[in-house]
Amino acid sequence: MTATATQPSSDEQKAGAVPTFTVTLKVQRYNPEVDEAPHFETYEVTAHATDRVLDALHQIKWEQDGSLTFRRSCAHGVCGSDAMRINGKNRLACKTLIKDVNPDKPITVEPIKGLPLEKDLVVDMEPFFDAYREIQPFLITNGHEPTRERIQSQADRDRFDDTTKCILCAACTTSCPVFWNDGQYFGPAAIVNAHRFIFDSRDDGGSQRLEILNDKEGVWRCRTTFNCTDACPRGIQVTKAIQEVKRALLTSRF
Amino acid sequence: MQIHKYDVVIVGAGGAGMRAALESSKRARTAVLTKLYPTRSHTGAAQGGMCAALANVEEDNWEWHTFDTVKGGDYLVDQDAAEIMCREAIDAVIDLEKMGLPFNRTPEGKIDQRRFGGHTRNHGEAAVRRSCFAADRTGHMILQTLYQNCVKQDVEFFNEYYVLDLLMNTGPDGIERTAGVVAYELATGELHVFQAKSVVFATGGAGKVFKTTSNAHTLTGDGMGVAFRRGLPLEDMEFFQFHPTGLAGLGILLSEAARGEGGILRNADGERFMERYAPTIKDLAPRDIVARSMANEVREGRGAGPNKDYVLLDLTHLEPAHIDAKLPDITEFARTYLGVEPYTEPVPVYPTAHYAMGGVPTNVETEVLRNNTDVVPGLYAAGEVACVSVHGSNRLGTNSLLDINVFGRRAGIAAAEYAVDAPWVDLPENPEWLVEGMVEGIRGRESGERVVDLRKALQETMDRNVQVFRTEASMKEALGVIEELKERYANVVVQDKGRRYNTDLLEAIELGFLIELAEVITLGALARKESRGGHFREDYEARDDVNFMRHTMAYRPPVTVEEESPSAPFADEVTLDYKAVTVTRYQPMERKY
């Protein structure tokens, strides 16, 4: 527990009672209907040790200010709705426990960067999905379809396992300084999803995807800062995947 | 207000909606309306697999699968529908593989298969390896693969459009047909009327009726509620599945695959208690039985933890490498959310509200029924929102991913084929009046009660009174609370009065659906004086095939234009009727495992 944990009262000392503590959140607010520019507002909430940042945001929305707006759905890190900047780092609010982000100090929550801001923590995801769609994120095959499943060894399946985990939350892409400064760059998530197919032994579309990524706004813009790998809530080795795509372009082997 | 015109409108972009879209968009002009970006749908949270009798690793056939599905559903399954699902399962899996789904593989490179609850060899002899899977992310892979193929096929999506009403009208032939839907656009607050010849509801479940649930915040039963308000029936709503292994206190799902891979449930004494409840297949008994057994262990004082309020899922005897290969996500959930290391410590688990077996009734062609025999021309439903009924009173694990693929596909084909030949139906006058009334009624209210207070009261009473164990008294208590909430809802207030991304307002509207559905669930459960599958009455512990081997059909009077456009369009009265179960080859037997 943290230093801000209140001393449990005698009732709470009953076995199994979860201690609560007070935590301050500094949340970026912006409603273009009324605000000229984004600004921060500060809220205090009562949290449990097992609470996530999403729980704190819900507490604000449900009990203090219903107009606080953010996306969320599954609340356990698989749907990718609630990527946001928490204490300056891209994370999923539902996968970030409050106790793990130093609740002694105010927790700063901002929208992910580099996509058009719509309201509070909501950004326009369309440019992100446009880049994803651009790299042809689907299996491309030539020749006759077999009547049963295609045969693939488990080793070949394992080759691209890491990049199949992507949930398109945009945490990686919107942590990338190149993406912030150059709106045309495909960004890590699109390259991860290209990797997922380029290295799938069943796929015949590798060359055409690599050609797309060889574009000046493609894979070569990556400066290997590793922000993306740090940001990925699924633990995907994003930078490594990008390196593998670069290598495939240089050697034409994949 | 904007008006759009499409041959087919699909509502929902989870597995069923996108599987339907892949078929429909090849045949007719199709729009998919979805309250979430497609890849956010809750299909992505499904973990363990999708069963099909591929027989890749051991002998199996679709007839055994059908039997297991019927027995698993405690004989309330419509057997013609189950036969179709289990027979078409094989092609459904192969289709997904061809679309690119990265299944785990056998040493020969075929799709690998594993054991799952209630799936057996030769009518119950032993557990069989039938579930096709991709680690414990099968739903994620299905959702991604279907979305990828929608991108390939250029399917037209309207993202973050909340469908809040269904339009029907009398066609040129004098028959009442589907005319379209009304949607609320999250980004702008604008209403959109989609005129369509056919509409497919694929809106998913309603787990947020309960407090402890594996379901997403967005699973608020909108599709069921919309159909119900228009006077269409809801079938078997009292049957709600409580998944045995939710993370204790949180409800986050830990796949049954954990037990399929060898995990064991233990009580505080370390006893493998499922040996007492299901001697043959033990931890791999169907979910209703396991959930009830767990709740019973806790109730009888053998629960683990400081409050003795959960049991333990033990994976510690499995090799860490095996866990990493087959169960990577769920073990990470245990680490992230409970700080428990599954390699070395057992994981605290307790049942969590997981799946609605009931829903909008359909026939096997996915056409929506308006009563026991007649369909609404042009209206289709598939997936969790629908009740076809392949799950009866208890769904087997993996059969939901199967359901969405088999019946999603059927719905897409049927809706498009209907649209090709069917006449256009005029939109009713003022098509937006009901939605406008809801939206403006709530937005315009200056003072009143907060959404969270009502939702909390609803979810708490449902958890306390209509969960794994039910009695007449507990359900009457719940109905009392629900009745009160219906009145309080007319006074609910939101703080956000704006038009852009007003999620405050939408949560209020979603709450209306939850209250309405909770009432239907509880009324059906109160009237069903027997125990069957997921519905267990402590005051009627036996299954009663004489009086209750039949589907519940709940109705309410439709909202009508004559009324003031109401912000809380509840019915004063819900009536229950019943529908026969289709039996083809399996007569009901005692259900033992």
Image: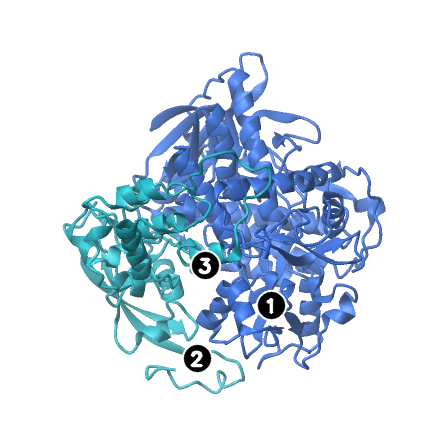
Chain colours: A cyan, B blue
Residue B514 vs residue B216, the one in the foreground: B216
Q: Nearer the viewer, mark 2 or mark 3?
A: 2
Contact between labelled residues 1 and 3, with CB atoms less than 8 Å apart: no
Q: Nearer the viewer, mark 3 or mark 1?
A: 1
- Give me the C-alpha separation between circle 2 and circle 3: 23 Å
Contact between labelled residues 3 and 2, with CB atoms less than 8 Å apart: no
Q: What is the quadrant of residue B354 in the picture?
A: bottom right
Position of B198 with respect to A246 (left or right) is right
Q: Which residue is mark 1?
A: B350
Residue B442 vs residue A239, the one in the foreground: A239
The three-letter code of the residue at mark 2 reads Pro
Above or below: residue B232 compared with residue A241: above
| Residue A188 shows in this picture | no
| Residue B286 shows in this picture | yes
Above or below: residue B150 compared with residue B243: above
- Give me the C-alpha separation between circle 3 and circle 1: 25 Å
Pointer 2: residues within 10 angstroms few (<14), some, or many (20+)? some
The three-letter code of the residue at mark 1 reads Tyr
Q: Which residue is mark 2?
A: A19
For the point 72% across and 54% down, the residue is B533
Contact between labelled residues 1 and 2, with CB atoms less than 8 Å apart: no
Pointer 3: residues within 10 angstroms few (<14), some, or many (20+)? few
The three-letter code of the residue at mark 3 reads Asp
Percent position (x, y) of residue B403?
61, 43
- Chain ID at mark 3: B
- Chain ID at mark 1: B
